Amino acid sequence: MTPPPPDAPWSAALVARILDDARTHGVRVLGLSGLQGTGKSTLAAQVVAAADACGLRAAVLSLDDLYLDPDARARLARAVHPLLATRGPPGTHEVALGVAVMEAARAGIPVRLPRFDKLGDRRLPERDWPMVDGLDLLLFEGWCVGTPPEPAAQLVEPINALEREDDAAGTWRRWCNAALARDYPALWSGMDRLLFLQPPGFDVVFDWRLQQEQALQAAAPGRRGMDAAGIARFVQHFERVSRQALRTLPGRADVVVTLDAQRRVLPD
């Protein structure tokens, strides 16, 4: 059975459960973590809409909107490792920008929310970022939100063909893991509560991410995106940290929503 598209709506019951949980715990910044293609963005948008209906001011910040632009990643690729030209893994985000947005949201002061154009592979100009003021709730969503670094011993052996062929010495994966340990705790600590959308395993990510790419291209006909072969290589950049998320986040998240391969929510 083919899973529903990544923009298929989540149930009203789940959305209400998430919003009620946030309100019960006095959450100002709610982390929403889930592997690629899980449907995080759609869920976050639905929670914002439900919050608005209750008279709450809510908005979304995505980890993806903190991507470094291609020129910055190219500098990293030259200085550290060629794989850092690809956006997404730890070390390819402007973490300080995310921290600043969270701090402003928590203080209830006006702030612009960064936005990244994935098909154009570039962050939009700041003048095009939406301005929010006096937020009651900020949802911070992303594929590795809340994930801790791996122990050094786990980095020795490559986990897939990409690591075996393009990172045989382990330079890239060690650098990304070091960034995850050094920089990202400042983002994670800005969350009051963390929800994890737990898939059945990493093997579903290719199909889900391919659907996500197709949806992006359908929304912007004529713009270049990745084909299936490109997606297959692309998701290998995320496999190591994704598997670390699967190992650790069920025990670290405040709320775990378990999904099957069709993105259906399983009973607790």
Image (tube, rainbow, N blue to C red):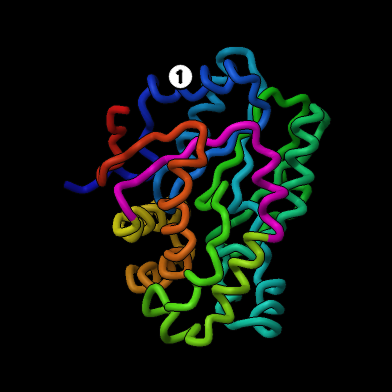
Q: Amino acid at mark 1?
A: Ala
36 inside magenta stretch? no
Residue at x-position 38% and y-position 30%: 10
Element marked by disc 1: helix
**Extreme-top residue of the structure:** 54
Position of residue 219 measured from the top left corner of the image (x, y, whole percent) = 45, 50
Instruction: Name the residue nearer the viewer: 2 or 120.
Output: 2
Residue at x-position 42% and y-position 35%: 256
Establish if 87 lies above or below 115: below
Badge 1: few (under 14), some or many (20 or more) residues near its Cα, within 10 Å? some
Residue at x-position 33% and y-position 45%: 5
Residue 70 horizontal side relative to residue 172, left or right: right
Position of residue 122 measured from the top left corner of the image (x, y, whole percent) = 64, 62
Q: Which residue is mark 1?
A: 16
Residue 60: which quarter of the image?
Answer: top right
Instruction: Name the residue nearer the viewer: 143 or 155.
Output: 155
Total residue callouts: 1
Residue 25 horizontal side relative to residue 159, left or right: right
Magenta extent: 182-201
Residue 207 horizontal side relative to residue 212, left or right: left
Position of residue 166 measured from the top left corner of the image (x, y, whole percent) = 47, 85
185 inside magenta stretch? yes
Residue at x-position 62% and y-position 73%: 175
Instruction: Name the residue nearer the viewer: 255 or 22.
Output: 255
Position of residue 159 measured from the top left corner of the image (x, y, whole percent) = 40, 73
Quadrant position of the C terminus in the picture:
top left
Residue 266: which quarter of the image?
Answer: top left
